[in-house]
Amino acid sequence: MTAEARVGRRMEQWGWPSRYDETYRPDPREAHWFRERETMPPAERDAAITERIREVMRWCWDRAPFYRRKWEEAGIHPDGIRTLEDFEQVPVVTKEELRLTQAAHPPFGDYLCVDEREVAHLHGTSGTTGRPTAFGISHEDWRVIANEHARVMWAMGIRPDDTVFIGSYFSLYMGSWGTLVGAERLGARVFPFGAGAAGQTRRAVGWLREMRPTAFYGTPSYALHLAEVAREEGVDPQAFGIRKLFFSGEPGASIPAIRGKIEALYGGAVLDSGSMAEISPWMNLAESAARVGMLVWQDIVYCEVSDPRTYRRVPYGSEGTPIYTTLHRRSQPMVRLLSNDLTRWEAGPSPCGRTYPILPRGIYGRIDDMFTIRGENVYPSAIDEVVMALPGYGGEHRIVISREEAMDELTVRVEYDGPTEARGQAAIAELRRRAESELRTVLGVGASVIPVSPGTLERTEFKARRVIDDRDLWREARRAT
């Protein structure tokens, strides 16, 4: 037996294929779901992960033409991966490659590693930025998602006596379903309210007052919108009694200004989570009750924060883009899936005792969302953090990038709140002045701020879309003249 195998045997519920005792649940007073796995020395865990990566790669090599073709072209074989450093030589997979192979081999692409008759759940992307990507999930992998999400939600402090309100779309979107099956596996009461129907948010206010759930899941944007609607109905959101609010789907819950605003509104603790739907269990990045940043749950999905040019891991303390490898999924395994997200990681342990790496600021942007204004790289999340912390901020804003002649211009439309409106033009002008000053300090480039009255900008019940890039329209107009 290899040293890696001996380490693997000591890890609770660790094997390939993964098997779970569906009757197991820790004592509610226990802080960890699998104490040994979560608190073991990282080097021991890494040895087991290395062996698991070889097992996953062998599985893909034998069953997925997509991976075998890609690795043969790169001169890679699973048996040659002896260390995590070796693994960095494996070529990354992009979302565009997944879309192309699904177009050529519909519906699931030639990286489906089980018989199509084993697919028990169909999910996917919306396709708003191209061909939708189909997720074919076996029943076995559905239980993987449930069990691993239960582990992470347990670390957040959610217990069987909690009621979890799910305030997000029940559709192709994996976030709602992962939360649902994870909460069920944990033994909590589940309130799958959903979102998206006309008038549903106002109905949610009544249900929340009636049922008083102790935990809430959704997007940060929706939590802010829900609180705004509650106040319009004359209800203080703290009356709902929610003690834990956990989020995914968009940056925000790790941004101090947004986190602080939500916590002040609801009186509960905010926790961030989430990575990519393609690699669910997407809670492989998630905070624990210690709330020192998102933990990188490496024994659920192996994550490398990497240089976006070389795709090699960056040292702790550095910024990079996460690359993900599933360690338990067998139907559509992801091996080095490139995220194009942006984060910075640090070595653990966390005060909760877990020895995973930590993302102190969570996922705070996307490389492909970055735009350049007069030579400065600007991330929308940096603008969000400034304007949402402004006294007098009314709950919504829009970032407009435009061009006049040869110069890019950045404009931020910011709603002011009711008290600011009541104080008159001087207060509105001060909001504008302060916003422009703070944006220049943070971004290194000037931005014009246009204050707008409360309720001007559309709210969302899903992921916020706040950036409007008008430069393409300018270029088209120039070409037409």
Image (cartoon, rainbow, N blue to C red):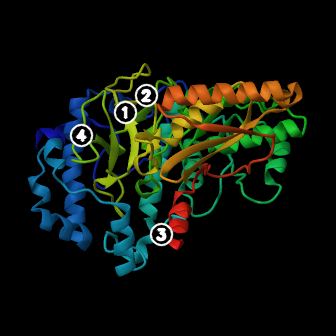
Q: Amino acid at mark 4?
A: Arg
> Considering only order in the chain, which callout, 1 or 2, is on the residue closer to the N terminus?
1
Mark 4 is surrounded, within 10 Å at the Cα level, by few (under 14), some (14 to 19) or many (20 or more) other residues, namely many
> Considering only order in the chain, which callout, 3 or 2, is on the residue closer to the N terminus?
3
Mark 3: secondary structure: loop
Residue drawn where x is 83% and y is 39% of the image: 230
Point out which mark residue 313 bears: 4
The quarter of the picture where residue 101 lies is bottom left
Mark 2 is surrounded, within 10 Å at the Cα level, by few (under 14), some (14 to 19) or many (20 or more) other residues, namely some
Q: Position of residue 403 (x, y in %)?
A: 54, 52
Q: Can residue 332 be seen from the camera position used here?
A: yes
State how far apart marks 1 and 4 are (Cα): 11 Å
Q: Which residue is mark 3?
A: 130
Q: Position of residue 86 (x, y in %)?
A: 13, 47
Q: Are marks 2 and 4 in contact (CB under 8 Å)?
A: no
> Which-is-in-front pick, marks 3 and 4?
3
Point out which mark residue 274 bears: none
Q: Are marks 1 and 3 in contact (CB under 8 Å)?
A: no
State how far apart marks 2 and 3 are (Cα): 32 Å
Q: Are marks 2 and 3 in contact (CB under 8 Å)?
A: no
Position of 220 with respect to 48 (left or right) is: right
Q: Position of residue 69 (x, y in %)?
A: 19, 71
> Considering only order in the chain, which callout, 4 or 3, is on the residue closer to the N terminus?
3
Q: Which residue is mark 2?
A: 360
